[in-house]
Image: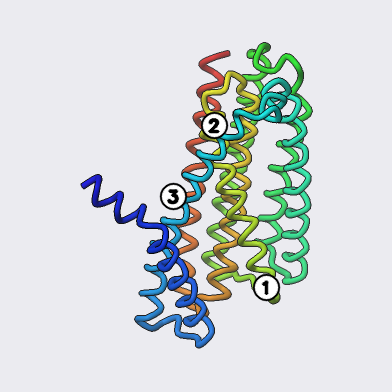
């Protein structure tokens, strides 16, 4: 079974390259000639999903190889010696980009007069402010004064739990009012690219820092994941509005599923942060 799965998802490079290009060209053909609701469209979706899985596996293997190579360089040695300082700066830089993106979302909400989108943008900006607060609390003694860090972790968990109730209300509003958003031209592809970057980097960082001795740093990565998931909700609504042929039932189902998953993950993460903080304080 393991060999079969290995051959299926780690094919020969030439075969994988051919599959990837066929899937890409087939998607272009479907969207160019508006064949979204035809059998060939469903075939292209399945093939594209398969190609994406292969690409992710290849990308992961390249990252592992690159990671092993990078660890032998002087730059990596400098990073390890100044990891805390660089983490703090990277957190501030990422928060600045997130904040700019949040302003962009808010502008789109105002432009399209969409209250749910405005509310979603404000929610996103609040998370950015919490990340900024974490960055300000990262000091040289991070990971040592654990009592204060667990106190901060508990506060963040409570805030996230409260905000998750607000998020649940917003998702219900999206479903009930059949809200939609449409980006002009190719902007939706830029937004999609940025959102996928956010979610991939957030998942990697949460996995990387989950065993970190600093609750403060771990909480910042959890916030990154929340920010990324919020972005994915708005992206999904925009993608369905753009490519879903105004299918209200399909939009309701997809938004409900995505909303439930995001709310469940956020709630679980918030409760875990609170319990973990109370336990260790």
Name the foreground residue: 16 vs 233. 16
Q: Name the residue beneath numbered marker 2.
A: 208
Quadrant location of residue 108? bottom right
Q: Pick whichever of labels 3 and 1 is earlier in the sequence.
A: 3
Secondary element under disc 1, as helix, strand or loop, is loop
Residue at image coords 53%, 66%: 176
Name the foreground residue: 18 vs 207. 18
- Disc on res. 186: 1
Q: At which x and y percent is residue 172?
A: 53, 59
Is 204 placed above or below 81 here? below
Secondary element under disc 2, as helix, strand or loop, is helix
Residue at image coords 49%, 69%: 251
Q: Pick whichever of labels 2 and 1 is earlier in the sequence.
A: 1
- Disc on res. 97: none
Quadrant of the image containing the C terminus? top right
Is 124 placed above or below 22 here? above
């Amino acid at each position: 079974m393991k060999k079969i799965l290995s051959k299926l998802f780690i094919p020969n490079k030439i075969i994988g390259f051919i599959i990837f290009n066929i899937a890409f060209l087939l998607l272009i053909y479907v969207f160019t000639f508006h064949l979204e609701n035809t059998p060939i469209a469903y075939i292209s979706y399945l093939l594209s999903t398969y190609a994406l899985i292969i690409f992710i596996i290849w990308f992961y293997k390249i990252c592992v190889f690159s990671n092993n190579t990078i660890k032998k360089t002087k730059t990596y040695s400098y990073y390890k010696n100044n990891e805390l300082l660089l983490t703090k700066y990277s957190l501030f830089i990422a928060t600045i980009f997130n904040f700019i993106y949040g302003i962009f979302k808010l502008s789109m909400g105002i432009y399209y007069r969409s209250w749910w989108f405005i509310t979603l943008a404000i929610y996103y900006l609040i998370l950015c402010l919490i990340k900024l607060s974490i960055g300000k609390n990262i000091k040289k003694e991070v990971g040592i004064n654990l009592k204060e860090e667990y106190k901060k972790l508990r506060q963040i968990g409570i805030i996230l739990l409260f905000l998750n109730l607000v998020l649940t209300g917003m998702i219900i509003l999206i479903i009930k009012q059949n809200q939609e958003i449409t980006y002009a031209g190719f902007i939706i592809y830029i937004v999609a690219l940025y959102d996928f970057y956010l979610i991939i980097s957030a998942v990697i960082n949460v996995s990387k820092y989950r065993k970190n001795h600093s609750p403060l740093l771990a909480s910042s990565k959890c916030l990154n994941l929340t920010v990324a998931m919020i972005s994915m909700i708005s992206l999904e609504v925009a993608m369905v509005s753009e490519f879903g042929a105004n299918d209200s039932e399909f939009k309701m189902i997809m938004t409900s599923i995505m909303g439930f998953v995001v709310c469940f993950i956020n709630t679980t993460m918030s409760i875990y942060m609170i319990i973990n903080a109370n336990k260790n304080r």
